[in-house]
Amino acid sequence: MRAGLEAIRVAKLWVGFRVGFWGKRLFALQGMNLELEKGKTYALIGPNGAGKSTLIKTMLGFLKPTKGTLAILGGLPKEAVLSGKIGYTPENPGLYPHLNGLETLMLAGSLLKLGKITARTQAMRLIERLGLLGHETREVKGYSKGMQQRLALGFSLMGTPELLIWDEPMSGLDPIGRGVVRNLMAELKSEGRTLVFSTHIIPDIEESCDALVLIDKGKNISEFSPKAFLDESTRGYILKGLGQLAPNGLGADVRVLEAQEGGWALEVPKGLLGETINRLTQMGGAIETLEPIRPSLEELLVDRFLNHA
């Protein structure tokens, strides 16, 4: 990766804690190496106790490395935090219950030393983007958990930070709230922001992430594009469409699942997709849907972790 393109660089990072009467040191991170590029979205995936939250806290300067180095936007973590370049949302955000939604975001603007007009403009724009318009004068204690979570994400976005670090941002969100956050992630990516977040909700990250970072036992065991990972695991396709079929003209390896008057469904091996589409076109067939035959991303990740263990 060329210099200047890195948002986060982790090299041989060890983070340990003293526990027990004799102060035995246990390591939550064990020699981790990681390079995350600016302008991309990364999901940190791993079982409980894998080291995700420890990594996030170290990125923010809350924890000090025992050994190794960690650079955020080319400098020390605390420098990036104090300069307002990082926006952070914890898994369980501690919002002030007696402030309303607008006051909560204005507080963030005050901490960042934004002018009142600028802060209010940013706050109202975020309230609309997060689906909270109409609730901005309501006290936070009256918000649902999902609404509080979305407001906390808005808090992290005040001041327009270039790097966002979110710990379990989908926690407590209903399907509508998750949709709002997925759309927000896409918007942030289009704006060139870098987003790093941890999650256990696998279906919500297939389209929102450039890369998944798998973490287990304090190490990053793998990093890959979810789309490439899924494409690699695809073994075939289900094609559904309209028109008359000539089954003998499809090839022996193409299986007809359904053939009704004017409509059909086929199972096509991965390597024969292009050839089959050409044959269907020659027959006058019109493809309506194409669905890959593959395990879910969650099943693939579980298998990857089990094989690693």
Image: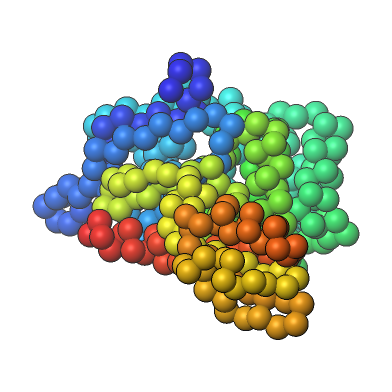
Quadrant where the image shows the C terminus: bottom left
Q: In front here: 79 or 196?
A: 196
Q: In front here: 75 or 306?
A: 306
**Residue at the farthest left position:** 22
Residue located 73% across and 73% down the image: 244
**Residue at the farthest top position:** 3
Residue located 60% across and 49% down the image: 208
Residue 118 percent across, percent down from the top left? 82, 31
Q: Residue 170 sits in which quadrant?
A: bottom right
Q: In front here: 191 or 162?
A: 191
Horizontal side, residue 121 vs residue 108: left or right = right
**Can residue 297 be seen in the rendering of this structure?**
no
Residue located 83% across and 50% down the image: 128
Residue 53 percent across, percent down from the top left? 41, 50
Quadrant where the image shows the N terminus: top left
Q: In front here: 138 or 14?
A: 14
Residue 42 percent across, percent down from the top left? 50, 43
Q: Is residue 74 above or below residue 263?
A: above
Q: Is residue 16 above or below residue 12?
A: below
Q: Residue 292 sits in which quadrant?
A: bottom right
Q: Is residue 71 above or below residue 164?
A: above
Horizontal side, residue 123 vs residue 287: left or right = right
Residue 105 percent across, percent down from the top left? 74, 45
Total numbered circles: 0
**Residue at the farthest bottom position:** 260
**Can residue 192 be seen in the rendering of this structure?**
yes
Residue located 52% across and 73% down the image: 255
